[in-house]
């Protein structure tokens, strides 16, 4: 019997650790290389819809997620000044009934910890910290990487899940070409006990408005409120979501918006601000025994709340493709790319299109756009990544 493939996973973020769990459960040897000196996640809230929850439950993470998640009753679109609910989509029990899986709101750090704990408990997973990849090479039989720390690692497969500034993508395909979207995002988390009772509804609330939009929802079983405000702006330089901003500037950007939103901002201790950049879909993700996953190959704007979910779907798909063709890694990676590229490109486009929709609440065809938005979510959430033909 042939020895299991050794897979090098670049990056121990949400996508990389989901991948490590998927691979380990299929019997692969997994070597995770993370450039940071400690495991962890920055950022705040992440939404995992039923199509992603399906994979996470398959990995046996249902109980661990239930301990740290908030399950919203519905999604709602509201008017930026009046607060009127313009459209709703049922979540909660309706997600279970329609799609078979829940819709989760998670703090990124909590989600990351669930994935890290599960991966670390697997005997066929090793995680190496402080290992930033600076070079890679391939032969017909394997792939090797060198790190900035002077270490060398080798295996039969390399999967770059190392984010928007992916070193693996740069080594395979050269630098990417991000474009500033004209949008800048704010984020903050607020302890719920600072707010009037019932101030935030048990929903994923998206206030669409004039030149911007504002999203808020509960985290950690309702103990925290996650807020993200996006406003159009002409210029921005850095692409990072860990840059601290001033609360008064956050308030200034949303000074004409509903008082409920300004109350949220007033109760935020720390605010972060970052520019939103967009990328065209890549024509190819794979080269020989190496491929890409998640933001490394299809970074997308957060306007469909599907960035993390697409990485989860990627992780399951590439694992099953390798399991179906372990003796032909390049073919397996091409099959993975074929299964994923069109879907992720479509979600990238849908997210891009939502800028116009979210930032103009008073357009004449609003009802038509709301219906289209609702249909798009049904298409997303109903996808069953486990039922694909992985062999092709």
Image (cartoon, rainbow, N blue to C red):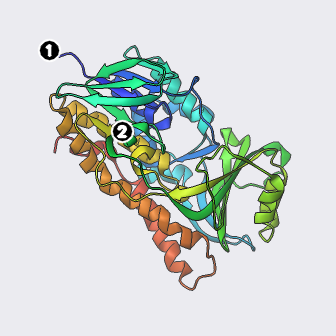
Give me the C-alpha separation between circle 2 and circle 1: 34 Å
Is residue 382 shown left or right of residue 319? Answer: right
Q: How busy is the neighbourhood of tag 1: few (under 14 within 10 Å), some, or many (20 plus)? A: few
Q: Which of 50 and 7 is in front in this view?
A: 7
Disc 2 element: helix
Is residue 315 shown left or right of residue 217? Answer: left
Which of discs 2 and 1 lies nearer the camera? The answer is 2
Image quadrant where one finds the C terminus: top left
Q: How busy is the neighbourhood of tag 2: few (under 14 within 10 Å), some, or many (20 plus)? A: some
Q: Which residue is farthest bottom?
A: 364
Q: Name the residue under label 2.
A: 171
**Disc nearer the start of the sequence (2/1):** 1
Residue 230, position as x, y percentages in the image: 65, 61
Q: Which of 342 and 291 is in front in this view?
A: 291
Image quadrant where one finds the N terminus: top left
Please report the residue visible at 49 percent of the width from the left and 73 percent of the height from the top. 371
Residue 317, position as x, y percentages in the image: 31, 40
Q: In this view, does 282 lie above or below 68?
A: below
Please report the residue visible at 48 percent of the width from the left and 49 percent of the height from the top. 307
Q: Name the residue under label 1.
A: 1
Q: Nearer the viewer, residue 96 or 181?
A: 181
């Amino acid at each position: 019997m042939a020895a299991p493939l050794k897979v090098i996973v670049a990056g121990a973020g949400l996508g990389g650790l989901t991948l490590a769990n998927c691979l380990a459960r299929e019997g692969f040897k997994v070597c995770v290389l993370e450039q940071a000196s400690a495991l962890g996640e920055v950022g705040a809230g992440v939404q995992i819809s039923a199509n992603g929850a399906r994979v996470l439950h398959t990995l046996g993470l249902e109980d661990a997620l239930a301990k740290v998640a908030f399950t919203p009753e519905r999604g709602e679109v509201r008017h930026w000044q009046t607060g009127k609910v313009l459209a709703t989509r049922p979540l909660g029990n309706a997600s279970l009934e329609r799609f078979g899986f829940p819709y989760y709101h998670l703090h990124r750090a909590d989600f990351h910890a669930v994935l890290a704990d599960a991966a670390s408990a697997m005997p066929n997973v090793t995680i190496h910290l402080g290992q930033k990849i600076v070079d890679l090479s391939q032969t017909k039989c394997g792939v090797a990487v060198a790190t900035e720390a002077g270490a060398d690692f080798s295996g039969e497969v390399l999967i770059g899940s190392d984010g928007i500034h992916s070193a693996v993508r740069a080594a395979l395909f050269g630098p990417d070409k991000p474009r500033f979207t004209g949008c800048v995002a704010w984020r903050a988390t607020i302890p719920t006990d600072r707010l009037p009772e019932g101030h935030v509804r048990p929903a994923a609330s998206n206030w669409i408005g004039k030149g911007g939009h504002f999203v808020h929802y509960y985290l950690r079983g309702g103990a925290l409120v996650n807020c993200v405000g996006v406003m159009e702006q002409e210029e921005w330089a850095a692409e990072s979501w860990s840059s601290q901003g001033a609360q008064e500037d956050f308030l200034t950007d949303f000074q004409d918006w509903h008082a409920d939103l300004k109350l949220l901002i007033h109760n935020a201790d720390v605010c972060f601000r970052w520019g939103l950049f967009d990328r065209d879909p890549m024509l190819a993700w794979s080269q020989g025994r190496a491929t890409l996953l998640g933001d490394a190959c299809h970074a997308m704007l957060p306007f469909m709340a599907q960035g993390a979910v697409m990485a989860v779907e990627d992780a399951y798909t590439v694992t099953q493709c390798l399991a179906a063709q372990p003796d032909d890694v390049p073919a397996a990676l091409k099959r993975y790319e074929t299964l994923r590229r069109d879907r992720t490109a479509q979600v990238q486009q849908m997210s891009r299109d939502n800028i116009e929709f979210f930032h103009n609440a008073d357009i004449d065809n609003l009802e038509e756009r709301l219906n289209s938005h609702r249909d798009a979510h049904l298409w997303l959430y109903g996808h069953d990544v486990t039922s694909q033909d992985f062999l092709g």
